[in-house]
Amino acid sequence: MSKVQFSEIPMRTWNWLGVNEAAVDSELLAEARKLDVNIEPDHQENMVVEYRQESYGAVNINVGENASLKLTQLQLLPEDREHANEINIVLEKNARIQLVAVETGSRAFASKVNIVLKGNKSRADVSVLYFGDGDRSLDMNYVLDFQGRKTVGNLEVYGGLMGQSQKIFRGTLDFKQGVKQAKGYEKENVVVLSKGVRNRSVPIMLSGEDDVVGNHAVSSGKISEDKLHYLMSRGLNPVEARKLVLEAAFNPVLELIDDEKLRQEIDSYIKERLENE
Amino acid sequence: MAQEKTYIEDIERTLYDIKNVDKSKYKSQSGLTEDIIRDISARKNDPEWMLEFRLKSLEVYNQLSLPNWGPDLSELNMDEIVTYVQPDAKMTGSWDEVPDDIKETFDRLGIPEAEQTSLAGVGAQYDSEVVYHSIQEDLVKQGVIYTDMETALHEHEEIVRDHFMKLVPPKDHKFAALHGAVWSGGSFVYVPEGVHVEIPLQSYFRLNAAGAGQFEHTLIIVEKNASLHFIEGCSAPKYNVTNLHAGCVELFVNDGARLRYSTIENWSRNMMNLNTKRAVVGKDGIIEWVSGSFGSHVSMLYPCSVLKGENAKCEFTGVTFASKGQNLDTGASVIHCAPHTSANISTRTISKAGGKATYRSAVKVTKNAPYAKCSVNCESLMLDDISRSDTLPTMDIEGDEADIGHEATIGRISDEAIFYLMSRGISEEEARSMIVRGFVEPIAKELPLEYAVEMNNLVNIELEGTMG
């Protein structure tokens, strides 16, 4: 199978780091599940997109003036499958998107999300949860493209890695010239649970405007021994203690999933993997 | 109401911009050919292995492409660059023997004065050759070697051969290969085991010839449990043609040793500054980088620290100030290769008047480096809405025992801060100046006093162009 370039960071860096672009098998993109959505002005919508078997999915959304959308996307493919998905969102004036993305399935996946904050005072709140175990490969590329004034974009990412899993997370806040009083924030917290993982993070901030506030932060580390020791002193075994810590780490995203059944499915899925490791 | 700003087109940089009449003794032809390299090598009386090294580097240069990331380098035409300019002066240990025009240049830059007051040794390079070198006698007695690279190549050939471009091999990138082919000048420092050089050494690189390149090589070896502070300064007058700087710095910090490498770079605005700096640090060793980038038209500069020994440490403190016509792409990289290694990277970037400042970094933790710690902090200040400030850090971490953190911010001087200072009777211009000086203070405090003063002067020169 031949590889094709699937996504690229907005500004390239050293090639030896291997983070400039993501490639996927061309055949993966042949079977597409595509969805075009237009949220009318002043409307509020709630959508859930679930990937359970699809090789590739693309969602294109326009959120009209004063409209808002909560989009929950879950990727729960079986472990023997590969997957790619993309989300392209344009926000008009005063529009809002709340995107909750859960990337827990498939043997290898690449996802790209591009949100254009086109209209003044538009807002994007993006929460991402990823989890890798075994020899899984996770590749994510999220871009918040600030084009309107007084726009707000937040990108919060919570991840857990174990086994020999490999992950690249690229998150970009791109403040275009003229986006006066725009604010952007990006945070990635990674909990590392095994020696064999490879964890790559690329938090990019681009600015052609001085009247903005942009912050990003990344932290990566294992669960502290003190924390585990404390939990085990309360009667939990090591697996239970780790499960509890990870559950707490993922909770900011899990609690945003409205469907209790789905939330429990993800929770159980992660716990099962922890036990199998 | 929108704030209006007035820009002064040309800021006077008299001190750095005075040109001397080009009295070079010899200039190679412009461009890059095997004949030119053979000619340079012959004039330098290189050993045979060095000629071979240069020719192999040329082959590598011709095979490699320009980087497909970073600033646009299409303005650089190697066919127009003169790679070797031999000044009409011989290397000497007495300023009295340096030709008047060259000595006056270094006088203006304050080098002989600093030598008297605060340095243990000085090297001064003019175009492609070192014209002056000195070192205090007591250091010589302790076995410290501080000389130009050409002398080192002949008098300490084995040491040079064992280390030269071993940390930065010509295959590293196109301009490393270029450096390997045409290098000339630079400093060699050897600090024996257990010797502490209490007072800094300084090498200053001045490029006077228009359309020329400077390719100095700095090789420093600090043996076990020894220490050194080395200062590097560089400047050039402005011309209307492109000049090129593709130097190379290789630092070997052995077990328990400590090296501080400070740079104030103030190249002219026609300079392409494509410099490579790399350090390898042994067990319990420490490398400290203090880096101020103010000049050049385009810069690509990312000092790299390879933490090879257990408990090796890196401290990187940098400031970059990009103004009109400047695209300064700077940063740092750290590679953790051993357990308990740690790094702390702290940078400030400022952009104004259409300047573009990019902070780029890489932190790599290999699986052989459990318990590695790294903290990266990057703050960017934009002084107007026509400039750019980009940050592009990458972290690549293997294993579960590393503790890595990264923080970055982009913003401008808050109106509240200006208002507060003005309410205390300070003019708006001075208030801005104070805030910018405060912003770079963490870097200034890492420099020896006279260099901190020079950096503040450079900040003031840059700010002169902006009226609130």
Image (spheres, rainbow, N blue to C red):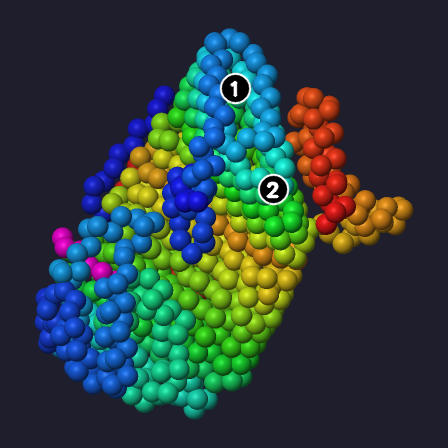
| Relative height, residue B408 to residue B275 (above, below) | above
The answer to which image quadrant residue B265 occupies is: bottom left
Q: How far across and how far down the image is residue B404, in percent?
A: 59, 53
Residue A80: mark in rendering: 2
Secondary element under disc 1, as helix, strand or loop, is strand
Mark 1 highlights which residue? Answer: A96
User: Magenta span has B319?
Assistant: no
Q: In which image quadrant can residue B113 be found?
A: bottom left
User: Is B94 left or right of B255, judged from the image as shown?
Assistant: left
Residue at image position (14%, 55%) is B241
- Residue at 67%, 54% in the rendered image: A194
Residue B234 position, x and y percent, is 29, 64
Pinpoint the chain carrying mark 1. A
Classed neighbour count for the residue bearing mark 2: other residues with Cα under 10 Å, few (<14), some (14–19), many (≥20): few
Residue B122 in view, yes or no: no
Which is more toward the observer, A217 or B316?
A217
Q: Which residues are magenta?
A: B240-249
Give the spatial CA distance, label 1 vs label 2. 36 Å
Chain ID for label 2? A
**Camera-side mark, 1 or 2:** 2
Q: Is residue A88 left or right of residue B46?
A: right
- Work out which quarter of the rendered image holds the N terminus of chain A and state it: top left
What secondary structure is marked by label 2?
A: loop
